[in-house]
Image (cartoon, rainbow, N blue to C red):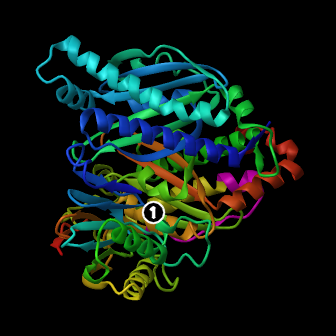
Amino acid sequence: MARLVEGRAGVTDQLKISVADYGVASEGLLTTSGLGSCLGVAVYDPDAPVAALVHPMLPHRDGEGSRPPERFVDSGVELVVEELLEAGGDRGALEAKITGGAAVVDFGSDGESIGDRNVVAAREALEAHDVDVVAEEVGGECGRTVRVDAKTGSVTVKRTDGVETRL
Amino acid sequence: MQIDIDALETYNTLARDGARSAADSLSQLTGIDAHVEVTNVSLMALSDLEYEYVGGEFCGVRIELGGALTGETMVTFDAEARRVIADTLAPGGGDGMRRSSVEEVGNIMTSGFIDGWAEHLEAIIDISPPAFFEGSGTDVLTAAAEETDEQVFIFRSRVESAAESIEFHILFVPERNGLIEALGPADEGSVSLEKLEVFNEMTEEGARRAAENITTMTGLGAELEVNRMNFVPIDEVPATVGDKRYIGTVMQYTGEPSGYLVILFDQPSAEAIVEALVPMETDGEWSEMEQSAIEELGNIMTSGFIDGWANVLESSIDHTPPTFVSDMGSSIMSPIVGRMARTQEHAFLLDSMIHTDGEGAFRCEMFALPDEAELREVLGNLLVERADRTRVEPDEVF
């Protein structure tokens, strides 16, 4: 996991989050790219201020303790909520924005896409932690690049079809 | 000779930790946000390293290793990375000062990279004084890549800075027998190195056939440029392919082993192919006819590629019709990797690059992702039941 809290600003003001990774920051930008079926879930407390971005790949960890929690939506959300509280966030003030979950590759008659299941899992996990989802930019067939402003929780989503959305 | 795959995983982790420590050193020294995008270990011909250094100016720092682990480690910067580092550390300085600043960064990074290894091996690794090098293209590799077809393991990390748009590489090329000795005695999780090599050669032959099929279909002369077998942590497969935009096809194959085959073209290459196959005016969007042309090419390449495996493995491998894709490479890989990550922590990513020459030239990258457990089993069976065939040159089989 990557951290951008007091002291590191000035060294670098941007943290890039890889697949199955997360970052916590009190200032600067948290970024991630290549979101296909994966999600970029931003959780933040704008009053603290502190923000987290997690880039999970699959919906449920299913009790497999040996597997990295950041890889899964349910355990990834739990992890970042805990990290935010530890970094000074207030549970009641946490808000979330969900991005990603596209079906970039059409696997045909293969049931629900991983992307759709990831989105459902994120809504459920955030609700379970009493975190309001205030915005979403999910689904479709395009990859996404996401930037989170750690101070404000403002999220910019750039899709590969050229559409840019501010959440 | 058996190679312990679990130990190779441990080594890959050491290389990644080393690269992170090197990247952190760079961040602390320069304020540049350095992020390790991917670390993998490849089984490849040393001479194939050349393609990464074609064109452009490079510089870097190289250290020779001896003792518990022999080989060499190098950090290479391209011209832009060199400029950014020198501008940051020696603003307004003369050439000598700028060079020293880059050299100093290289020295600190290489020693940061190697620190964890000695600790893990609980042994002493002798390190030569760091040597600065600079040059054009493949000149920088003269010490590392002698012309040889011998396959070696190469640990490679790609470090990027999003804010500065620069990237550079940290390479660790252990001496082959030294590495195998250091990896320790083989256990039941081990596979035959010879068999891995034969499989790599089979894949190369399959990719060559795919290239021939391109020629048959388009009339363009196509050649296989690079072939390597990467061993990558599953989460890092998308970053290995990168965020560049690609057009291509995804196929799923079933049999032993099962898996995915992804064929990707960059934008100008895809346009050149469509031009060669369906010469007509287009409006910039990928029409149905253009998509089918790409799919058809994917289909014929896949057949050549998969048949190669099936022949040697004496198994039946079928593949689904290709699906057209157009997106960031990493986004294309993410649903595929998501499916594979349910059952495996590492992926054998077989990566082949094909290029054509002349008018309408294009480049293409093929990524084959066989199911790890099934591949191990197939290789294991081959060793037991078809030991004689493992010594067969792929040329005789295809």
Residue B321 belongs to magenta span? yes
Q: Is residue B327 visible?
A: no
Residue at 21%, 32% in the rendered image: B84
What is the quadrant of residue A95 in the picture? Answer: bottom left
Q: Which residues are magenta?
A: B308-323
Query: Which image quarter holds the C terminus of chain B?
Result: top right
Query: Which image quarter holds the N terminus of chain B?
Result: top right
Q: Nearer the viewer, residue A56 or B396?
A: A56
Of all chains, the one bearing label 1 is: A
Q: Which residue is mark 1?
A: A20
Residue at 83%, 55% in the rendered image: B381
Relative horizontal placement of residue B219, taking residue B66 as reference (left or right)? left
Relative horizontal placement of residue A61, taking residue A39 as reference (left or right)? right
Vertical relation: B272 (above or below) B51: below
Vertical relation: B184 (above or below) B69: below
Vertical relation: A67 (above or below) B201: below
Residue at 66%, 58% in the rendered image: B372
Q: Residue furthest left?
A: B92
Residue B80 locus on image (x, y percent): 23, 31
Residue B153 locus on image (x, y percent): 61, 35
Relative horizontal placement of residue A138, taking residue A115 as reference (left or right)? left
